[in-house]
């Protein structure tokens, strides 16, 4: 490892600010949360669009971009860091 390299630009990129992820704010039922956890982190074959459509059917409107960010653990909610929706 090279400790003399200035990595501050990478470290600064790790700190993101913005709105809380909708996955952390929606009041999902335990069954909905379990389904989302499984689909988001164990079923990459189910598209982000499909997840957003099901969430809309549950009256939780979100975008497929938000779903993608959450699935890739790039959102701001603490749950995405642990792998739970």
Image (cartoon, rainbow, N blue to C red):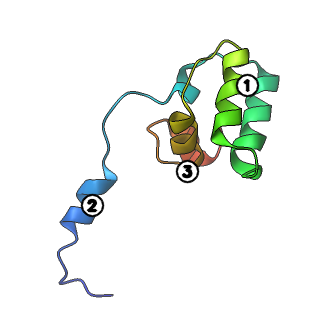
Give the mark nearest the N terminus, 3 or 2. Answer: 2
**Which type of secondary structure does the marked residue at label 2 adopt?**
helix
Q: Position of residue 51 (x, y in %)?
A: 69, 33
Residue 9 versus residue 32 in the image, above or below: below
Q: Position of residue 53 (x, y in %)?
A: 69, 26
Q: Estimate how packed mark 3 is, as few (under 14), some (14 to 19) or many (20 or more) residues with alpha carbons within 10 Å.
A: some
Q: Residue at x 70, y 48 (%)?
A: 41
Q: Estimate how packed mark 1 is, as few (under 14), some (14 to 19) or many (20 or more) residues with alpha carbons within 10 Å.
A: some
**Which type of secondary structure does the marked residue at label 3 adopt?**
loop
Q: CA distance from mark 2 to mark 1?
A: 36 Å
Camera-nearest residue between 37 and 49: 49
Q: Which mark is residue 11?
A: 2
Quarter where residue 2 is shown: bottom left
**Residue denoted by label 1:** 54
Residue farthest toward the bottom in the current orientation of the protein = 1
Quarter where residue 7 is shown: bottom left
Camera-nearest residue between 82 and 31: 31
In the image: residue 61, left or right of residue 8:
right
Q: CA distance from mark 3 to mark 1?
A: 19 Å
């Amino acid at each position: 490892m090279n400790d003399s390299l200035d990595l501050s630009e990478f470290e600064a990129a790790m700190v993101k600010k913005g709105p809380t992820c909708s996955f952390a704010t929606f009041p999902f039922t335990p069954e909905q949360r379990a389904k989302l956890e499984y689909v988001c982190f164990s079923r990459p074959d189910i598209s982000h669009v499909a997840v957003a459509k099901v969430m809309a059917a549950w009256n939780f409107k979100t975008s497929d971009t938000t779903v993608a960010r959450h699935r890739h653990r790039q959102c701001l909610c603490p749950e995405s860091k642990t792998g739970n929706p």
